[in-house]
Image (cartoon, grey):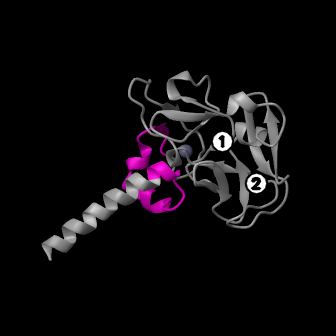
Amino acid sequence: MKLEIRGGGDYKGVFARLAIKTGERLAIFGGRVIHVTKEIGDYGIQIDENFVIDGASVHSGDLYEDTFFINHSCEPSAGIKGQIFLVAMKDIAENEEVTFDYAMCLHETKGAAPYRMECQCGRTSCRKVITDNDWKIQELQKKYDGWFSWYLQEKIDSAKGSATGCNVRAV
Ligand SMILES: [Zn+2]
């Protein structure tokens, strides 16, 4: 296994046990698919505007456990491929924490409380408050192009497509 949960008390995170190269698959999110409003805690990964894979449903000490404590960072080391694969966005050093940006998978859900988390990642690029609308931020769309969950990447790409269409007509 490449990853390991470390820390205790208030802070737990997932760390690289060995050096990892860009593009290596780090983890697979698993669990039962449930409606966002049914999620207890913050342990799932959103795969649709209304659905989340509930990591808590398989939290039992196997490989999936590695995804349970993966933290958010505004300068993450990993991104999402497809809907459930976590992949290294850059070379990750041994003992470095593995993080992803929650903007890569969160979308607001009608009827659910808005997501809001205060971030203390301490990076200069820190957004301070993470919401389920962050995927709409253009700067992030550029920064994480190809690293968003499939359903968000589709939305972003189709919006880009229509913008190009306008330009073509303008010419
Ligand atoms: Zn931050």
Q: How far across and how far down the image is residue 35, in percent?
A: 52, 28
Q: Which residues are magenta?
A: 127-152
Question: Under tag 2, what secondary structure?
Answer: loop
Q: In the image, what residue occupies the spot 84% across and 34% down?
A: 61
Between the C-alphas of marks 2 and 1, the distance is: 12 Å
Closer-to-camera residue (25/3): 25
- Give the class, few, some or many, for how many residues have Cα within 10 Å of label 1's Cα (few <14, many ≥20): some
Q: Amino acid at mark 1?
A: Asn
Q: Quadrant of ligand 1?
A: top right
> Where is mark 1, residue-wise?
71
Residue 98 covered by magenta stretch:
no
| Quadrant of the rendering where the C terminus is positioned | bottom left
82 in relation to 21, above or below? above
- Furthest residue toward bottom: 171
Q: Amino acid at mark 2?
A: Glu
Q: In the image, what residue occupies the spot 50% across and 59% down?
A: 144
Question: Under tag 1, what secondary structure?
Answer: strand
> Where is mark 2, residue-wise?
96
Tag nearer the camera, 2 or 1: 1
